[in-house]
Amino acid sequence: MTAILLVMAVAIAAEPSYLVERVVTCGGEVRRVSVFRNGTLVVATSRAGQPPHLRRRPLDEVERQVLQQLVEESYTALAEGKYRVDKAPGDTVEVRLAPPGREPMRLVAALALVRPLPLCRVEHALDELELTMAEGPAEREDLSSWVPVVGERLELLDGRLVTVTEVFAGEEDLVVYLRIGDGPAAEYFFLRELRAKVGRRVGR
């Protein structure tokens, strides 16, 4: 089975301008989704012999911060994994991660290959951002006075579905425990941090 090609840049003349980008090559079409460090989202589609079609929009500060955190988490998880270096012939997907202060990482896989979870999370976030460009920015609910309750289900801006399992008072703010998906994995956040990460409430 074709493995993922993992390349860590060793020598860098200058830090890249992008935070993350994905390049999908399928047939004669190349589709590139890039998020630059200044918070600009750019989608470029091109075919051989034709000029590229470009679309762009600025991310708001919450979108940018959430994506940067996701890129940093995924970068760490992928760097700690063990991937056999191989070629990826035919249609491919290439993802480039460049969190600030880290050496850029480039991952290439056959388009039909099942990718590791950290990479899937990055791709899902890019898919969601591309959809907001096609449909217009989603109107986010005002959560400035929201207090979560146990059992409430939320969709985070990175696409994950979580369930509130516990809420209790910390020293300076409420602490909220979240169960990730339907599995045992859990995370906790201060309420002020969680408000910036929630895309929408999806019921109980």
Image: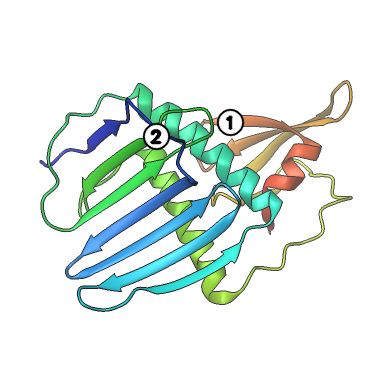
Looking at the picture, the colour scheme in use is rainbow
Q: Depth check: give the residue in front, 47 or 196.
A: 47
Q: Residues within 10 Å of mark 1 (few under 14, many from 20)?
A: some
Q: Depth check: give the residue in front, 93 or 50.
A: 50
* Residue 203 seen anywhere in this rendered image of the structure: no
Task: For the N terminus, give its image quadrant.
Answer: top left
Residue name at image x 85 percent, y 50 percent: 146
The image quarter containing residue 170 is: top right
Q: Is residue 138 left or right of residue 171?
A: left
x and y percent of residue 55 in the render?
A: 49, 72
Residue name at image x 44 percent, y 53 percent: 124
The image quarter containing residue 118 is: top left
Element carrying mark 2? loop
The residue beneath circle 2 is: 104
Element carrying mark 1? strand
Q: Which mark is residue 186?
A: 1
Q: Residues within 10 Å of mark 2 (few under 14, many from 20)?
A: many
How many discs mark residues in the rendered view? 2
Q: Which mark is residue 68?
A: none
* Residue 192 seen anywhere in this rendered image of the structure: yes
Counting residues from the start of the chain, the first of labels 1 and 2 encountered is 2
Q: Is residue 28 left or right of residue 170?
A: left
Residue name at image x 38 percent, y 31 percent: 12
Nearest to the eye among marks 1 and 2: give it: 2
Question: What amino acid is at disc 1?
Answer: Ala
Query: Against 194, is 48 above or below?
Result: below
Query: Against 15, is 26 above or below?
Result: below
x and y percent of residue 48 in the render?
A: 20, 73
x and y percent of residue 75 in the render?
A: 43, 32
Q: Depth check: give the residue in front, 123 or 187.
A: 123
